[in-house]
Image (tube, rainbow, N blue to C red):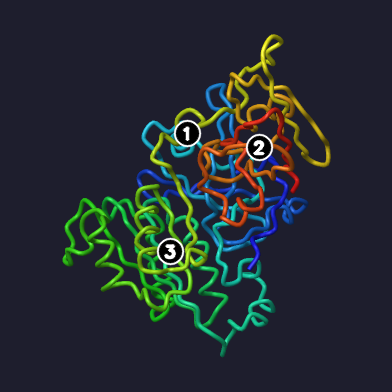
Amino acid sequence: MTAPTKKKARFNSLQVSEVRRLTDNAVEVSFEVPEELRADYDYVPGQYVALRADINGQEVRRSYSICDIPRPGVIRVAIKRDLGGVFSTWANDELSPGTAIDVMNPQGAFTSRVNVTSLNDAQALIDKGFAEGGDAPHLVAIAAGSGITPIMSIAQTLLAALPKATFEIVYANKGGSDVMFAEEIGDLKDKYPTRFAVHHVLSREQRVNPLFSGRIDDEKLSLLLDKVVRTGDTDEWFLCGPFELVQLVRDELSERGVDSDNVRFELFSTGKPSDGPQQGNTGRPVVADPAGKNITVSFQLDGLSGSIESPQSAKETILNAALRARPDVPFACAGGVCGTCRAKVVEGDYEMDENYALEADEVAAGYVLTCQTRATGDSITVDYDA
C-alpha cells in the first residue's frame, strides 16, 4: 500500500463555524471550508491539520487530528486543554464561532493501510475485495486521552464503508468525565453492536473488573491482549497517545511477533513539554560566521531554489536555517512528531535527532524531519517538494 498523496503544506484563513464542549477540558472546533478550497482540504481519516494563531502577540502553531469522517466543506478537530498550554488554553477559553484563524491543509500518514487512499471511494473498496461478500478486516486501536481523536475518524469511516469490518478500541483515561466523544462512542456501539467494541480503562476510578482500573502497565497490557482484545486475528493496529504508552504497546506487539508494517502509531507528546515554547529551532537569530566555518544549506520549495550559510558552531537545524531564507517553509510542531517539515535529502551527510513521524521506508529513501536534522558535512541540499 502507498501512503496518502502528500499535498503541499500551506495555510489558509478559515472561519470557525462551531465550538462544541466535549468535556470540562476539551472542545470540538469546526471550520467552514469555502467551495474554492474544498479540494485542498479533502483528507483521509487519521490525518491532522496545523492551526496558527496570534496569541498575546506571539505566533503559535499546534497540530490537531481531524475527528470526523470526510465531509465536504467542514474540518473538525478536538482540542484538549494541556496544563500550561498556550494554544489549548486559548482555544478552550476564548475560541468562538466567527473567529478566523490559519488552518493548514490536511497532512499526515496515520491512516489505515487496509484502504489507505480509498476509504471514501466505494469502487476502490470493491476492487480491493473488502466490499460486501469479501474479506472482513479486524482493526484494533489503543488510545489515551485526546489520542482518541484520529481513531474516531478512522473507526467511523471504516465501519460505514466496509459492511463486515470490525473495530475494537482500548481507551485509557483518568476518569469517566475525561472520556472524549462519549456520545459518539455510544452511538457507534448502538449502530454496530456486533462490529464495534470499546474497553474503557480508568486510572483513577475503581471499576467492577479490576483489569479496567489503574494505569496500563506491562502486566495490565499483557492481560488485555490475552483476555480482552481479539489479538490473534487483528489485521491492523492503531496506537495514539503519549510516548510512554505508545512505546509500551509497540514493544509488546513486537515481542508477540506482530509485523511492524501492521502497527500504525502517532504521538500526541514525546514525554517533553509539547504545548509550551516551540520545540526545536524555528527561526532563531543566526548569522554566518565571517571568520569561522560555515555550512551551506540549500533547499527546493515550490519549485524555487534557495540557500543560506549556517555557522557550524551553531549546530543549526535545516528547518531553522531554511526559515531564515524563506519564512513560508512548512512546519508545525518542530518537535519531530507531526511530519509537516518533511523533506528529502538530495545531497550531503546529516544526522536526525528524533523521528516520531516518518516510516522506515521513508527514512531509507532519504526523507528527514528538517526540524530534527543537522548537516554533518560542508553542505546539504534538501527537497521539500519531493
Query: Is residue 265 shown to the viewer in this render?
Result: yes
Q: Position of residue 241 (x, y in %)?
A: 41, 51
**Residue flagged by tag 3: what amino acid is it?**
Glu
Query: Is residue 101 shown to the viewer in this render?
Result: no
Q: Position of residue 339 (x, y in %)?
A: 59, 46
Q: Secondary structure at mark 2?
A: loop
The disc, 1 or 3, on the residue closer to the chain's N-terminal end is 1
From the viewer's side, name the closer residue of 345 and 135.
345
Q: Secondary structure at mark 1?
A: helix
**Residue flagged by tag 2: what amino acid is it?**
Asp
Residue highlighted by disc 2? 349
From the viewer's side, name the closer residue of 70 and 382.
382
Q: CA distance from mark 2 to mark 3?
A: 48 Å
Would residue 288 appear left or right of 224 to someone viewing this image? Answer: right
- Asked if the residue under mark 2 is in contact with the one under mark 1, i.e. CB atoms within 8 Å, the reply is no
Question: Is 133 situated above or below 331?
Answer: below
Mark number, residue 172: none
Residue highlighted by disc 3? 184
Q: Position of residue 299 (x, y in %)?
A: 75, 35
Q: Residues within 10 Å of mark 2 (few under 14, many from 20)?
A: some
Residue highlighted by disc 1? 90
From the viewer's side, name the closer residue of 216 and 170.
216
Q: Nearer the viewer, mark 1 or mark 2?
A: 2
Residue at image coords 62%, 44%: 368
Q: CA distance from mark 1 to mark 3?
A: 25 Å
